[in-house]
Image (cartoon, rainbow, N blue to C red):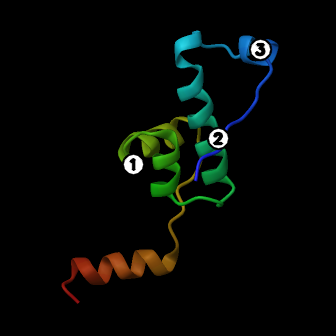
């Protein structure tokens, strides 16, 4: 499924990046916002933005958006690291 947004020209012109970078910029903004609101996982947000998870993680850090990482996930990762 795909979605097309109709954004008025004057609104697009107000976005503070070169015209050629606006689509990428908007996708990254949407991905970060949806991740921050816990709507998307890290992988889903990275896919939406069209960038690797590592790059999205770095961008989230620059924006001071905390990673979603529960105590349950930590326990599972620690058990895996111990070979359990």
The residue that appears at 76% across and 26% down in the rendered structure is: 7
N-term mark: 3 or 2: 3
Q: Are marks 3 and 2 in contact (CB under 8 Å)?
A: no
The residue that appears at 21% across and 82% down in the rendered structure is: 82
N-term mark: 2 or 1: 2
Which residue has dot 3 on it?
9
Q: Could you say whether the residue bearing mark 3 is in a helix, strand or loop?
A: helix
Quarter occupied by the C terminus: bottom left
Horizontally, residue 78 falls left or right of residue 22, namely left
Dot 1 crowding, Cα within 10 Å, few <14, some 14–19, many 20+: some
Q: Could you say whether the residue bearing mark 1 is in a helix, strand or loop?
A: helix
What residue occupies the far left of the structure in this picture? 83
Residue 10 position by quadrant: top right
The residue that appears at 50% across and 56% down in the rendered structure is: 44
Badge number at residue 53: 1
Compare residues 6 and 28 and report the one nearer the observer: 6
Location of residue 10 with respect to 56 vertically, above or below: above
């Amino acid at each position: 499924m795909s979605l097309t947004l109709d954004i008025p020209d004057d609104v697009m012109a107000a976005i503070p990046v070169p015209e050629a970078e606006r689509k990428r910029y908007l996708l990254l903004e949407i991905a970060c916002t949806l991740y921050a609101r816990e709507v998307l996982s890290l992988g889903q947000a990275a896919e939406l933005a069209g960038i690797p998870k590592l790059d999205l993680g770095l961008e989230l850090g620059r924006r001071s958006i905390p990673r979603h990482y529960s105590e349950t996930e930590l326990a599972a990762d620690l058990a895996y690291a111990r070979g359990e």
